[in-house]
Image (tube, rainbow, N blue to C red):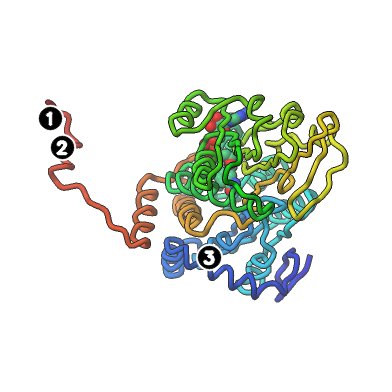
Amino acid sequence: MSATRSLEYDVKDIDLASKGKQRIEWAEREMPVLRLIRERFAEEKPLDGVKLVACAHITTETANLARALQAGGAESILIASNPLSTQDDVAASLVSDWGIPVFAIKGESTETYNRHVRTALDSHPEIIIDDGSDVVATLIKERGNQIKELIGSTEETTTDIQRLKAMETAGVLTFPSIAVNNAQTKHFFDNRYGTGQSTLDGIIRATNILLAGRNLVVVGYGWCGKGVALRARGMGSNVIVTEIDPIKAVEAVMDGFRVMPMSEAAPIGDIFVTVTGNRHVIDGQHFEKMKDGAIVCNSGHFDLELNLVALREMSSEPQTIRPFVEEYKVKRSGSRVIVLGEGRLINLAAAEGHPASVMDMSFANQALSVEYLVRNKGTLQPGVHLLPAEVDTEIASLKLKALGISIDALTAEQLEYISSWETGT
Ligand SMILES: NC(=O)c1ccc[n+]([C@@H]2O[C@H](COP(=O)([O-])OP(=O)(O)OC[C@H]3O[C@@H](n4cnc5c(N)ncnc54)[C@H](O)[C@@H]3O)[C@@H](O)[C@H]2O)c1
């Protein structure tokens, strides 16, 4: 841990700041909606003096969210939401150029990661921005006496909305939490187009393989899976989908993809991408059937979608071939299975995460959720909340404006027609 201008922080190398600043400002060019929010926040100061902890992927886009929150008057601390997703130059720049304490180092151990979560809680936050529920879960499990200080929290990703709902059912979610992921301007774009593009970007940067002509298996056809499948098809891959939900499976079939169980996909896939939010969706029996050289990676939130414990047990010692590329030799079949990014989010481990243009809308939702919580302090019921639908529409309208695209408005006649029940055949 180090300090600059009496600021506590834990980053890899503070001298990386100037490179980070350049990249943060580059991302800002693609984030016009968040910039408008930052400018309004700077005038209105809706978060004046609010103590905030943001547990997020420390990327250029998150840095721009932190700038908006700071402009609104928040006193923020940032920690990594994943040991492999931190961009060390961005962490350095946030500390050095904006005076925001950051506790995040790419490749940090689980122990350090957990220590940072506790350091963040030591600041007694009134607002928690979570991406993976780890801060909220630690608060509930270990710091019950601090819950009364909390105005509320927000959650970024799909998997952890489920965790929050489980906390609600168990009666331990005693404060309001906004499900940012469930805003349409978040998951329609971030999960689908963001994950779609950046997951392939991660695979390509890690391996430099050609996707054309390869059998690419997408495990889970939710929002992220649809994006990965769509973009992989665009790159010429033969996409195969595996699912457990009959409706999603029919959707994948009608979208033109082959659908089959993992036991059938395992021996024919060249590349496997898991995006389910579920555990061990590729398991020992699947690794055993894979072709020599099959590439396996995950873009779901946690690193347990691939059962790497089983793979380790059934293989000889893994060899690191290139950064983020490890080769396991399966003893029984003799085949080599290539695991990317240690089974962690490949788009953040080996690439830079989502492009700024989609994070513009996701983080506009985050900034407006924090403002909503603060403005409605003490009036919201405990439990999982959605942002009001008007906010979604407003974010989409601002995005269209920034893109220079205008759309039609309902005429008075149309409005009357769709609001009435009397007109029929
Ligand atoms: N990589 C990123 O940057 C990024 C971005 C957004 C979300 N996420 C994460 O990606 C994961 C997926 O998010 P989503 O929004 O697509 O969720 P989703 O709920 O829309 O989709 C998940 C799909 O996986 C399917 N599934 C579950 N178990 C399965 C199994 N055993 N085999 C095959 N399919 C199975 C479900 O039926 C569902 O259709 C979550 O963990 C989410 O937190 C990652």
Is 217 above or below relative to 45? above
Labels 3, 2: front one: 3
Mark identifier at residue 423: 1
**Which is more toward the observer, 205 or 367?**
205
Is there CB contact under 8 Å for labels 1 and 2? yes
Q: Is residue 256 above or below residue 110?
A: above
**Mark 3, secondary structure of its residue:** helix
Q: Residue at 71%, 46% (x, y): give it.
A: 340
**Split into 4 quadrants, where in the image is the N terminus?**
bottom right
The amino acid marked with disc number 1 is: Thr
Q: Say which of 228 and 73 sits in front.
A: 228
Label 3 to label 2: alpha-carbon separation: 43 Å
- 424 and 334: which is toward the camera: 334
Q: Label 1, label 2: how many angstroms apart (C-alpha)? A: 8 Å
Question: What SS does tag 2 mark?
Answer: helix
The residue to which callout 3 is attached is 27
**Residue 104 at x, y = what percent?**
71, 59
Q: Where does residue 424 sit, x and y in percent of width and height? A: 13, 27
Residue 316 is left or right of residue 223, and the answer is right
Q: Is residue 87 left or right of residue 194?
A: right
